[in-house]
Image (tube, helix red, strand yellow):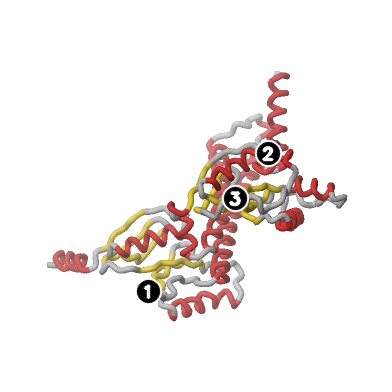
Amino acid sequence: MRNEGHSKEKAVNPRMRKYRLFTSYQKECRWLEQMALEGWFLIDIRVGVCYTFEKGEPCRLLYDVDQFRLSKNPTLEEIHRKEIFLEMASELGWREVTHDEGMVYYFAKQYEEGGINELHNDLQSRRQRAAKFREILEREANRLIFWGTVVLLVDLAAKLVQLHQRDLIGGWYDWIALLYVIFANLCGIWFRRYAVRCEKELRISRAEWESRMDPSGGKTVSKLILTNRGLRRFLEKQAAEGYALTAMTALKYSFEKNASGRQIYAMDSKRLVNSRLRTRHRQAIEDGKDWNGWNNDWEIQSVHDAEEAGWHFVCALETRAIIYRGAEGCVGPLNDPRYEKGFRGVSLIGKYGLVLLCSGTLGAILGFLIA
């Protein structure tokens, strides 16, 4: 009889576990919403990959997330922040479902036709949430890199102690330490990149994200382009096919569908900005303290020059280059055409990356010749 009762209870409220790994909160929420349409509702999540669902009547349920992890020394405002937010969310119809070990809280709400169907329905709140996620992810990255450095220093200290024994190969500890250092640094780098991507994703509205993910509305192309002329031709070819550039990295270009006439492109960089300034007999923009290209003086000057010539800002490739777009026949030249024949070495990998690459290549050649 006990087994029958237990089976009846399970039949009334059946549960199911699914294992998924997401690197996008937006995709994760859309998946949870699809599960709700099939009658499975989230009730718990463990270690970010184990989802527990409970069976119910299928309905259109919306999901959203927020982060409520306290810092080491929280202020009174931080302590009350979650309480205030939960009260506000409840007034808007959002209920707390569960949270994971990283204090990422999951909220759910019935879809309302014509109502407010986003937990963060204004730009300021989305920016605040995105900043929280990025800060926490970067904190995790710094922690991984810190402990990787500690393990490396401890291992080097042990090597110095063993130096007199001429035993530099070491045993199992050295291999474990080396693997951990590699793992920690790779994870730290990944967390940093993920933090930036996560912030960009959470800053935009649901509608904007869905439009970007719609295959009919845009596309992404992976391509290595080595020259400025090749980049311009590639972008203008895409424009002729009805696609306008929205973002780019060194190897990936994102486009949206755009049938607003023929578009042409121009790329600008710090070197080209300084070249224009010298032509005007003005002082070039240089900062000896700016080792990483974080000073935005040249970007400000570039935007001013481009807008005067009729160009519109599209995107920036980190701190190394800016891409502009304009309608053919409605914009003036931004740079001398001869610069288009140059290579994109600096814009692709940066000045210091280019120096390291050239130095490594030269060292390899000299080492081979000497050997």
Marks 2 and 3, the one that precedes in the sequence:
3
At horizontal 60% and vertical 31% (from top left) the residue drawn is 169
Q: Does residue 273 appear in this view?
A: yes
The residue pinned by badge 1 equals: 113
Instruction: Measure how far apart labels 2 and 3 are at the Cα level.
Output: 25 Å
Q: How many other residues sit within 10 Å of disc 1, few (<14), some (14-19) or many (≥20)?
A: few
Counting from the top left corner in percent of width and height, residue 146 is at 62, 51
Residue 349 sits in which quadrant?
Answer: top right
Type of amino acid at the residue the image marks with label 1: Glu
Q: Does residue 295 appear in this view?
A: no
Compared with 92, 37 (above or below) is above
Counting from the top left corner in percent of width and height, residue 7 is at 17, 64
Counting from the top left corner in percent of width and height, residue 147 is at 60, 50
The residue pinned by badge 3 equals: 263
Q: Answer with left or right where residue 288 lies relative to residue 172.
A: right
Q: Secondary structure at mark 3?
A: strand
At horizontal 46% and vertical 76% (from top left) the residue drawn is 89
Type of amino acid at the residue the image marks with label 2: Gly
Marks 1 and 2, the one that precedes in the sequence:
1
Instruction: Measure how far apart labels 3 and 1 are at the Cα level.
Output: 38 Å
Asked whether the residues under the numbered discs 2 and 3 touch, taking CB atoms below 8 Å apart as contact, a structural biologist would say no
Type of amino acid at the residue the image marks with label 3: Gln
Most foreground residue, 272 or 56: 272
